[in-house]
Image (spheres, grey):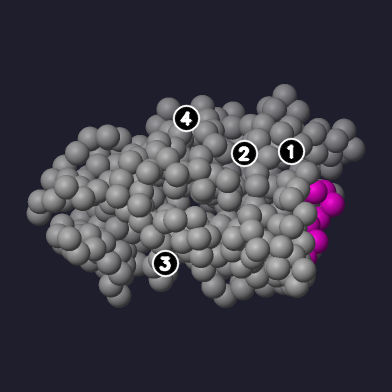
């Protein structure tokens, strides 16, 4: 049969079903994988989303016509059976399973394979064709277990509190903020949330996600600010709003913090490597578990992943989409690349060395050396752009 999903100017289009998946221009019917702004936009006539994410969509998009679908439940539209399955990315994130004429496609949206307390864990879905993201689709990206990162964040906060300094944690307001909150040791001090974060915390709590007590800055005594951790979006860094905290240490949490250049351009005291996207092993593992014979790669390191997958026996190609990176909020101000793709930095920051790839060929290749290129090419590896750093 012809491709079940194609790219149109409005977005990813299911041809037999006559609806779109995460369209970037207004359409009549849209199936939404999750509530980040590059995937869930205003102006569609009808929205279909996983039930846990309906509250997020309404909080971000306002009064919309949205139908919630439980994970695993099916509906049929124009002969296409649609079901939504956990993506493990943020609250309500889903993969879209499409079945028609004996053919099964899965559009993953954004996903991560490590479970956390704030959303339903990723569920592999068997299919013939798998549409995958590639935000961190380079071999240098390998995440440490999240508990180690939570321990590091708490240790940083605890030391700052002992020194009488507030701790300002900059992170994306939806998803990353709540994941960090779930890992905080509330005994250290007050937890303050920016006005863009707190409304989303309420949606998470309403969905049954346990989060520690959080307060607005106006509800905390000035003397207690010195022991507090403040969760705020990247756009708050350097703004007049943060001056009220006096002497503080700042940090940024993102997968991009693996790269020295990303932390340097952020100009923060600490960079914590924590991503809501799959790392390279996660991407490869997820693709393998689908048992898909064909893989379509979107937003991120598309050429690298396509070549790697083809060299490993899969039929792979890329889709050109308008999806961005939810970890790249305020990226323009930080000097990130316009397309949101982050080439590897030639030298990972020493603070994040334990997250770096241990394989010498991969590490050297990331630096763009000719010898390393020969080594990995000889082993059937993918081209990895090098010699630049990026931010998000």
Eyeballing the image, is 163 above or below 35? above
Secondary structure state at the residue bearing disc 1: helix
- Coordinates of residue 365 in the picture (x, y in percent): 72, 64
Q: CA distance from mark 4 to mark 2?
A: 13 Å
- Residues under labels 2 and 1: Cα distance? 9 Å
**Which residue position holds label 1?**
153
Q: In the image, what residue occupies the spot 47% across and 30% down?
A: 209
- How far separated are the C-alphas under marks 4 and 1? 21 Å
| Residue 180, disc | 2
Which range is magenta? 345-353
Crowding near the residue tagged with mark 3, few <14, some 14–19, many ≥20 C-alpha atoms within 10 Å: some
Confirm whether the magenta stretch covers residue 71.
no
Mark 1 against mark 3, which lies toward the viewer?
A: 3
User: For the point 9% across and 54% down, which residue is it?
Assistant: 78
In the rendered structure, which disc, 1 or 3, sits on the residue that comes first in sequence?
A: 1
Q: Nearer the viewer, residue 150 or 236?
A: 150
The reply to whether dot 1 and dot 3 touch (C-beta < 8 Å) is no
Dot 4 alpha-carbon crowd within 10 angstroms: few under 14, some 14 to 19, many 20 or more: some
């Amino acid at each position: 049969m012809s491709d079940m999903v194609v790219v149109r100017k409005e977005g990813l289009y299911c041809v037999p079903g006559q609806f779109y998946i995460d369209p970037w221009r207004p359409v009549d019917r849209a199936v939404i994988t999750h509530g980040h702004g590059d995937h869930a936009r205003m102006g569609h006539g009808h929205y279909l989303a996983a039930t846990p994410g309906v509250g997020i969509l309404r909080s971000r998009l306002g009064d919309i016509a949205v139908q919630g679908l439980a994970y695993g439940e099916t509906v049929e539209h124009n002969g296409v059976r649609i079901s939504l399955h956990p993506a493990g990315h943020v609250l309500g994130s889903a993969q879209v399973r499409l079945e028609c004429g004996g053919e099964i496609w899965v559009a993953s949206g954004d996903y991560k394979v490590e479970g956390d307390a704030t959303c339903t864990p990723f569920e592999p879905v068997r299919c013939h064709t798998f549409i995958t993201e590639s935000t961190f689709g380079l071999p240098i990206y390998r995440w440490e277990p999240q508990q180690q990162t939570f321990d590091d964040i708490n240790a940083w906060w605890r030391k700052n509190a002992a020194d009488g300094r507030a701790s300002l944690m900059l992170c994306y307001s939806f998803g990353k903020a709540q994941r960090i909150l779930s890992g905080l040791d509330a005994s250290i001090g007050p937890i303050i949330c920016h006005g863009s974060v707190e409304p989303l915390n309420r949606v998470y709590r309403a969905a049954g996600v346990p989060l520690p007590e959080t307060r607005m800055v106006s509800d905390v005594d000035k003397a207690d600010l010195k022991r507090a951790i403040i969760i705020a979006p990247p756009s708050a860094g350097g703004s007049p709003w943060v001056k009220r905290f006096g002497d503080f240490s700042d940090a940024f949490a993102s997968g991009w913090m693996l790269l020295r250049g990303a932390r340097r351009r952020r100009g923060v005291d600490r960079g914590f490597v924590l991503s809501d996207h799959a790392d390279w092993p996660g991407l490869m593992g997820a693709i393998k578990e689908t048992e898909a014979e064909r893989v379509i790669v979107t937003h991120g390191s598309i050429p690298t992943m396509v070549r790697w997958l083809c060299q490993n026996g899969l039929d792979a190609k890329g889709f050109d989409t308008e999806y961005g990176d939810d970890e790249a909020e305020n990226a323009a101000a930080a000097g990130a690349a316009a397309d949101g793709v982050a080439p590897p930095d030639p030298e990972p920051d020493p603070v994040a060395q334990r997250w770096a790839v241990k394989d010498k060929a991969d590490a050297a290749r990331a630096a763009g050396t000719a010898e390393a290129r020969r080594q990995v090419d000889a082993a059937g590896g993918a081209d990895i752009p090098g010699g630049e750093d990026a931010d998000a």
